[in-house]
Each structure stands twice: as structure tokens, then as C-alpha cells.
Image (cartoon, rainbow, N blue to C red):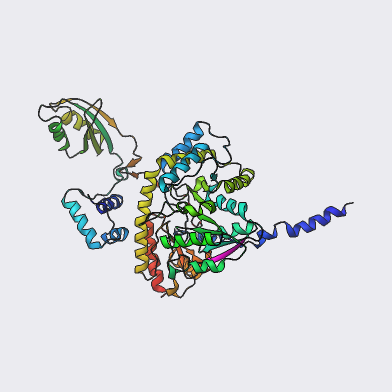
């Protein structure tokens, strides 16, 4: 990947709403070139989408999130892939990772009620054929998500004018 | 018997503050600071320090220093491991050797190093040529050391670089020192090779000491950074000043260093040991971390400044304020003469009408008239808003 693409990605990861004109000015490039590069990065699956980072606690006060550690018996020829797929197809699942260590899959469920999460674990997850066990850990407080602080901004201590 | 003390007190009333200090002009920035501080909701491009906080691993080294009881004095010159790390840094950056035992002094920011350099070498009446526009401290430090600052102006027409003839015409038999700062605060201009060579020539030809403040050298864009330590022919005449404030975002830690021939470092250290004793131990330990493991964080900040630099230069030129593309530091120095306003009128008007703070160019020397200093050490979001506001201000005043 070209250096300019890296730079464009670094800029967009910080602020996806920045205009191609501003990105072009920042890189000393032409806006048309930046537009084309972004389009290419979208087309080849490097940029998968653009989303708002929402502080869910401001939207639903009764919703919680949890991570579920799942122990799985791998299948010959597929490893963990098929079980992972069974799990990530549920829309309430935000992320699934295969982990090293004492469990296999890490499943993240976000913004659900306690009852919904319990139902998901008992009815859907634990009953899967290859799932040997689960441990559900509820998040008590979110401090930082996707590199963004959720509560309060960092205080600026700089004086407004210095030599 | 009792008349003596009364007479003494009357005299003291008049001479409480030394004449030399009374005569020192107040910093133009200080005055502007007071006005900005009174205006709420200001976007400030008037800040001469990084908007980043110190990289966390460096802070953590400082915290660890406290936790493990590093709370005592260090050697006057600075801890040996820090001086060794500085020596290694210069070797890696420029392939030049500085002896940690005799040629390196750790100071309270670059500022103390400026003061020490002047006090260590200037005799009363010695002249020091100070290139302007420049950081506010150089000329007053020369004066306080008993010397006479002789400004040499650099103009936009020559990309804010000095001409050899301008420097030469300022040289007199009393000239002892040439003080420069590239990449420059406030213009952001870095040296090109030909000016670099001219400065070396002038130093040799007129038998001068060169004080080169290179605190912004790690923030050099587009081209390889130039340091006078690579000019071996002036090695015995070079006092190189550097610091952790800018490239590692450590302004509040107050740590810098001087590199110079052993006799000059010994002289500077003599003053330093009496006035300062040693710099903060905690800051020194954090600085070791910065030198040994801070390269990646410093580069990430530099990349960010680089983008903002291009963005701001582009935006200012687009709105009709001719701006020389800066090649270092985090300042731009646009030409505002097209508005018909003076630097001060522009800065005050912009603050009042659009709530954007910039610093009048005149704060950095008379030749800064017609320019303002904008620092791009601010978030892109703040810069974008500031550029919009400056644009509407310029629109109303041209």
C-alpha cells in the first residue's frame, strides 16, 4: 500500500467526515486524487464503512454490554470457523475474536438489557453443539471506546498565548 | 545616629529595581496574553507549545521515578545516563560525537541554556548579532549578560532567511556572537544548504561564536534536518542549544541541553551550579525514556504537524494572506499587509471580531511588522474553525 493511502487512512480513522478537499490540503495533493484513492480503498475492502461513535449510555440508560468467553470444541477440517460463523450471524453480536489462552472465542454483545443477554446465552449460545462452556462478564463502566473517551474531555492546561 | 537608615530607605525607594531591568522592554506576548485571557470562547493559535500532552510512556517514567524515590539532586551537569543518551541521540541523528563528560550540559529548558550561553561568553559591551524575527528571549538575555544585542532582520522577500551581506554589515570589532534559531519561531522557516554554508563562512571569517538554538530541528519537514553540529570547521565555535519541549511535547518538564566545546560547557556549568544546582531529577529520568524509546511517538506527532502545516498554509494562501511555506517547527507567519492593517491592529481586530488569537509579528522584532504568527499546534477541528473565521475577517478588511 502506498504511503499516501496510509496517510489518508490515518486521517479518516480520526475523522471520517473530513472533506476530500481538506485531506488534499493536508497531504499536498489534488482533491481529485484523494477522492479516487478513497474510492479505491472502499472498493478493495480496506475501508469497510463509516459510523458514528455513540455513547449508548446517553441513549438507553437500561442497556448493558458484556463480553462472553466461549470454550469450543473445534471441528476437523474447519477448526473454529464454523462455530464462529454460527455465533457472529446473530445481529446482537458486535464482535467475535478467536483468542489464545484459557478459552477460545471472545464474543461481545452491546447495548442489550440483562434479560436479552441472559436469553441469548442460555438459548442460543450455550446450546450450540460445539460450545463446551461460557463465562459472561458484564461491563460495569466504559471509559474509552475506539480510542475515544466516553466521559468528559481531557482538560486543556495550556495557556492561550505563549512565546 | 539614626539619620543614616532613613537616608538609605529614601534611596531604596528609587532604586529597588535595577536600572538594567527597568530598561528591559516587556515581552510583547505577555501584554497580548492578558487581553486573550480576558476574552471567553477564543480559539487560540497563539500558543508556542505542542497541543499534545507528553507521550504516556514518558510520563510513566516520571511517575516511576517518584515511586522509586528519585527525589534527590543529581550531578550539576545532569545525570550521566541522560548525558550519555543525549550523546547517543546526536550520534544517531547526525553522526557527530559529543563527550558526555565534558561537552554536554542539561539545563532548565532551552531557555536557561540561552541565558547561560550569553553569561558564559559575553563581556560588557560585547555585541551579539540576533537574527530577527526571533523568539523573544535572545535579545533580553544578551542585555542581561551585559552584552549588546544587534538585530539583523530577515524578510519575507528572502523567505525569512538572512543574507550574508546583512549579517556582515552588522559585524563590528566588538561582535562576539551570532544567535540563530532554525527552524524558526515565529516564521517556521528552516535553513537551506546555501544559507547554512554562508553562516558557517561568516562565523569563520569574522571570528565569531555561533549560538544555534536547534530545539525545532527534529520538527523539520520535506527536507533532511540541518544541524550546525555537522559543520566540523566551526565545532570549536558552536554552542548548540536543544531541548525536549517541542519534539517530545515536554514543555512543562522544563528540560533542555547545551552542546559546546569543553571550556564553554565548564563555564556555563559554573553559573548553572550556583543558580540552578541541577535540573529536576524526575524530568531527567523522563527525558532518558524520551530519548531511548520516544522516537515513534515523536514521529507520530511530527506527521500530524506536517499535515496541519500543509492545510494551514494552503488555507491562508487561498484566503489571500501570502504565506511562505514553513519547513519546520509549528508556526506560519502570513503576510497581512493586504488588509491595510498593522500586525497589532490585525491581531486585536481578529480577536475582537472573530475570537481567534494570533500573535502580532512585532512581538518577535520590529521586522515582524506586516505579519502575524499562527501556531498550528492545535487540533484539525480548531484549525478548520479558525481558518473560517480568519477568512471572514480578511474578507471584511480588504
Question: Residue extending furthest top?
Answer: A132
x, y percentage for residue A47? 21, 49
In the shown orientation, is residue B318 left or right of residue B22? left
x, y percentage for residue B44? 45, 59
In the shown orientation, is residue A62 left or right of residue A133? right
Dominant SS type (magenta):
strand
Relative to A105, does residue B232 appear above or below in the rendering? Answer: below
The residue segment tinted magenta is B148-152
- Was residue B37 drawn as part of the magenta stretch in this picture? no
x, y percentage for residue B176? 59, 59
Residue depicted at x 41% and y 60%: B193
Residue depicted at x 53% and y 67%: B168
Whether residue B13 is visible to the viewer of this picture, yes or no, is: yes
x, y percentage for residue B229? 47, 51
Q: Nearer the viewer, residue A120 or B108?
A: B108
Relative to B205, does residue B241 appear above or below in the rendering? Answer: above
The answer to which image quadrant residue A90 occupies is top left
Picture quarter with the C terminus of chain B: bottom left
Relative to B375, does residue B169 appear above or below in the rendering? Answer: below
Question: Residue extending furthest right?
Answer: B1
Whether residue B33 is visible to the viewer of this picture, yes or no, is: no
Q: Nearer the viewer, residue B138 or A67?
A: B138
Amino acid at each position: 500500500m502506498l504511503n499516501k493511502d496510509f496517510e489518508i487512512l490515518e486521517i479518516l480513522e480520526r475523522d471520517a467526515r473530513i472533506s476530500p478537499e481538506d485531506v488534499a490540503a493536508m497531504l499536498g495533493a489534488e482533491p481529485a486524487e484523494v477522492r479516487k484513492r478513497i474510492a479505491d480503498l472502499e472498493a478493495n475492502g480496506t475501508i469497510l464503512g463509516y459510523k458514528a461513535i455513540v455513547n449508548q449510555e446517553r441513549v438507553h440508560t437500561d442497556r448493558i454490554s458484556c463480553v462472553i468467553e466461549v470454550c469450543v470444541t473445534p471441528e476437523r477440517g474447519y477448526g473454529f470457523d464454523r462455530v464462529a460463523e454460527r455465533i457472529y450471524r446473530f445481529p446482537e453480536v458486535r464482535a467475535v475474536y478467536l483468542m489464545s489462552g484459557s478459552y477460545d472465542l471472545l464474543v461481545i454483545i452491546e447495548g442489550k438489557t440483562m434479560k436479552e443477554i441472559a436469553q441469548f446465552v442460555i438459548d442460543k449460545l450455550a446450546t450450540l453443539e460445539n460450545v463446551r462452556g461460557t463465562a459472561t462478564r458484564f461491563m460495569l463502566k466504559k471509559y474509552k471506546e475506539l480510542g475515544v473517551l466516553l466521559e468528559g474531555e481531557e482538560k486543556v492546561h495550556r495557556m492561550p498565548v505563549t512565546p | 545616629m539614626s539619620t543614616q537608615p532613613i537616608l538609605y530607605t529614601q534611596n531604596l525607594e528609587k532604586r529597588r529595581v535595577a536600572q538594567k531591568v527597568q530598561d528591559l522592554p516587556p515581552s510583547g506576548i505577555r501584554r497580548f496574553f492578558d487581553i486573550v485571557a480576558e476574552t471567553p470562547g477564543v480559539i487560540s493559535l497563539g500558543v508556542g507549545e505542542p497541543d499534545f500532552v507528553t507521550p504516556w510512556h514518558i510520563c510513566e517514567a516520571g511517575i516511576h521515578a517518584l515511586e522509586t524515590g528519585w527525589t534527590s539532586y543529581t550531578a550539576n551537569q545532569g545525570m550521566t545516563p541522560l548525558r550519555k543518551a543525549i550523546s547517543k541521540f546526536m550520534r544517531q541523528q547526525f553522526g557527530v560525537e559529543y563527550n558526555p563528560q565534558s561537552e554536554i550540559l542539561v539545563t532548565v529548558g532551552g531557555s536557561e541554556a540561552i541565558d547561560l550561553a550569553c553569561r558564559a561568553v559575553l563581556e560588557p559591551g560585547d555585541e551579539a548579532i540576533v537574527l530577527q524575527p526571533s523568539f523573544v528571549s535572545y535579545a533580553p538575555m544578551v542585555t542581561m549578560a551585559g552584552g549588546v544585542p544587534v538585530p539583523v532582520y530577515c524578510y519575507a522577500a528572502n523567505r525569512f532567511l538572512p543574507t550574508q551581506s546583512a549579517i556582515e554589515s552588522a559585524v563590528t570589532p566588538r561582535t562576539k556572537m551570532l544567535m540563530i534559531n532554525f527552524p524558526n519561531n515565529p516564521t517556521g522557516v528552516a535553513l537551506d544548504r546555501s544559507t547554512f554554508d554562508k553562516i558557517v563562512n561568516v562565523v569563520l571569517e569574522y571570528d565569531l561564536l555561533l549560538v544555534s538554538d536547534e530545539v525545532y530541528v527534529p520538527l523539520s519537514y520535506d527536507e533532511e534536518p540541518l544541524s550546525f553540529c555537522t559543520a566540523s570547521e566551526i565545532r570549536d565555535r558552536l554552542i548548540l542549544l536543544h531541548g525536549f519541549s517541542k519534539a517530545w511535547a515536554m514543555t512543562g518538564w522544563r528540560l533542555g541541553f547545551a552542546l559546546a566545546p569543553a571550556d564553554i560547557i565548564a563555564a556555563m556549568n559554573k553559573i548553572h551550579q550556583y543558580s540552578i544546582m541541577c535540573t529536576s531529577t524526575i524530568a531527567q529520568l523522563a527525558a532518558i525514556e524520551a530519548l531511548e524509546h520516544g522516537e515513534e511517538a515523536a514521529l507520530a506527532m511530527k506527521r500530524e504537524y506536517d499535515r496541519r502545516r500543509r492545510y494551514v498554509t494552503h488555507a491562508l494562501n487561498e484566503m489571500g494572506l501570502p504565506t511562505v511555506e514553513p519547513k519546520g517547527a509549528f508556526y506560519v507567519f502570513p503576510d497581512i499587509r493586504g488588509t491595510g492593517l498593522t500586525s497589532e491592529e490585525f491581531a486585536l481586530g481578529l480577536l475582537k471580531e472573530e475570537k481567534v488569537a494570533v500573535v502580532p509579528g512585532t512581538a518577535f522584532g520590529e521586522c515582524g511588522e506586516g505579519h502575524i504568527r499562527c501556531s498550528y499546534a492545535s487540533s484539525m477541528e480548531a484549525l478548520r474553525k479558525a481558518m473560517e473565521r480568519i477568512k471572514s475577517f480578511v474578507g471584511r478588511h480588504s
